[in-house]
Image: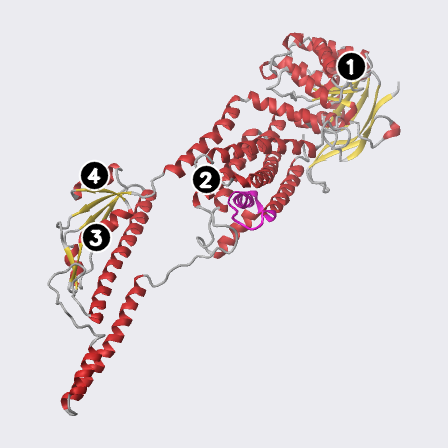
Amino acid sequence: MRWLLGKDLLILRRSRLLLALLLVYPVAIALLIGFAISRSPSRPRVAIVDESPPGETIKLGTQRLPVSQYTRQLLHQAQSLPVATRAQAIEDVKSGTAIAAVVIPADLAARLSSDVAQAQLEVLYNGDALEQSLARSTIESALAQANLGFSEQVQKAARSVISTLLAGGKLGSVGGVGGPENLIGLDHIPATLGAIAARQPHGRDRRQLEQIDAFAGFAAENLTLASRVLSTIGQPIRVNSVLLHGRRTPLNTFAVVVAVNLSLMLVCVLLAAGGVALEREENALARLIRGGGTSGSLISREALLAEKTLLAAGCAFVIAFAMLAGIGAFVTLDWSRVLLWLLALAFAAGAFGALGVAIGALAREVRAASLLAFLASLPLAFLALVPSGSVSGGFYDAINAISFAFPFKAALQSLDTAVNGAAPSLGLSLAHLAVLAGVFGALARIGLRSAE
Amino acid sequence: MSAVLSVSALAKRYGPARAHGGRLALADVSFRLGAGELVAVVGPNGAGKTTLLSIIAGVQSPTAGSVSRSAGEEGQSVGCKVGWVPQDPALYSKLSVAENLELFAHLEGVAEPRSVVARMLEQTGLGARAGERVGRLSGGNRQRVNVALGLIGDPPVLALDEPSASLDPSQRERLWEFVTERVQDGTSVLFSTHNVSEAQRYAGRVLVLAEGRLLFDGAPGQLLAEGDGEDGGDLERALVRFLRERTYPEGTP
């Protein structure tokens, strides 16, 4: 087998384009992913036109909130690009300077203060379907965050008013002027009024004072409740996330794992499939394995397949590890788990290699094998990345069954566990990969049954 | 003459083996190959020549019958003992002539690969092109390397499938010089060809195959003798007449 391995390495070394691709590919992908993860803007670029008059306020009862507070909330959610006019905003969106523009209308404060008409913002966006979707989801998210922030400001003002109504003092302290001062506060009324009523002779006046006293007590209790309710309805449900197993995987390190796994699969499957198909295309397969696997053959079919798997898996393993190490310069990876990375990469490479030789054994020429390998690999990768709940239950079950039968998902799970500690046990994924390697190896053996 | 190869009731069917299914490529073919014999397999296209040679070389397995080194060892595979030279050269085009020879010398388990490679390069006259990549060689030179690969393990039997098909006359001459030298050294050679004059000139025995059946097994002179001299000593005319008589007897429309 070592002579055949040496021959394949020599052929690989002489295939300059393929060799260059194998060397450049992981470096380029590692750099691209690294830059994309580490340098991407965390907030989208959005043009904002504030048409509201400077210093305008929104009236909340006896208090006033400046409109600029809402604008600040919105600017905080996006990488803002303040522009003076709507026309300039349209120009920025058209030219791609901003993915979208938000126009804060001049009547925003009036509508918010009216208690009747809902305030409206205008969102301008452009581009193809993908860009439109990105712009809409980004703006909607930014607006939701800004609305939530502004809503909290409104609640804070309302709670302050209720607090003053209960405790007494000066109303309008949040921002308004001209509110009544030295208010007694509903909490103090029962005691004060009770004392006054006690000094009154029994009769109609005393009964009326006692009635007012009871109402004040009732009102104070219910306003206390209203204050608590306001706190609750601002964010009625808080989310407490509990991960059932493993560690929480940061999205950027998961993206690294996906990229490395995809590269591992493509390099491994294409090399293995091409290697087997090349033996057929050069008419050498019949010369090598003639004799039907008896002692007469130069090499057994099993040894030939193992050699091609080993070659492809070895090359892909080195490339994938180089990618991980390269991306490690941009993203923090836990190097103390490096032995687990190597284990996961080795098993994944073995399973992808077996899939590759099966494809190569079925296809009769290099071009067909390469095309088949490529066409089979990419959909498998996409299917394995479909999250549960994003499609119907039955369809997801079908996707799961397909993903289970091919190595990409198991390789992804094992690598995610090795790199991120995403699942408690690596053994299950590795066992799955080993079984798949055996199954595809057997299919490849059947595919080589007819060598002529 | 002692037989180095015995072919017994060989049959090969492609496709399903039901009553009328598939295609019968070989049917009940039996013959023996003696040591140092040079035997030609001739016949029309689709006669089963390549199938017969590839079964003898162990590339395909027969549906029935057996190929063995001698009558007493029927059923044993002889693939390891037969040097195989397929019609399309089985070579690695990105390797040089010497690298191809050296690789197969190692795979064949040759004791001293380097000296064997040097000898093969000398015998094939490719010494000057030893370092040249096979992909850049002419068709004739590729075929010479192809034949050299078949002989590298020094097999007692050599099976050549239309070895001169892509060669010009001088290259053909050189090939046959090389092959006959091997025969003189004791190698038994079985080759298929469409060039009947080649069979007449070099082969000591001719096997005529048609529709998978062995119709004739004898010396070229015997085939000529069947025509009572009307073929004028031309084996090709004798073969055409023979096939017409055997496959389309008189009265057949």
Q: Along the horizontal axis of the image, is A81 left or right of A241? A: left
Q: Report the Cα–Cα distance between label 4 and label 1.
A: 88 Å
Q: Earlier in the sequence, mark 2 or mark 4?
A: 4
Q: Report the quarter where the C terminus of chain A lies.
A: top right
Residue B5 vs residue A150, the one in the foreground: A150
Residue B61 vs residue A16, the one in the foreground: A16
Task: Indicate which disc residue A91 carries.
Answer: 4
Given the image, what chain letter belongs to the residue carrying mark 1? Answer: B
Q: Earlier in the sequence, mark 2 or mark 3?
A: 3
Task: Indicate the position of residue B143 as horizontal and vertical percent values.
Answer: 66, 16
Task: Indicate the position of residue B121 as horizontal and vertical percent values.
Answer: 70, 11
Q: Are marks 2 and 3 in contact (CB under 8 Å)?
A: no
Task: Report the residue at 86% width, 29% height from top.
Answer: B73
Mark nearest the camera among 2 and 1 is 2
Q: Along the horizontal axis of the image, is B117 left or right of B1? A: left
What predominant SS class does the magenta segment belong to? Answer: helix
Q: Report the Cα–Cα distance between label 2 and label 4.
A: 40 Å
Asked if residue B50 is among those painted magenta in the image, a careful observer would answer: no
Colour theme: secondary structure
Residue B244 vs residue A308, the one in the foreground: A308
Q: Report the Cα–Cα distance between label 2 and label 3.
A: 37 Å
Task: Report the residue at 59% width, 32% height from top.
Answer: A314
Q: Along the horizontal axis of the image, is A85 left or right of A419? A: left
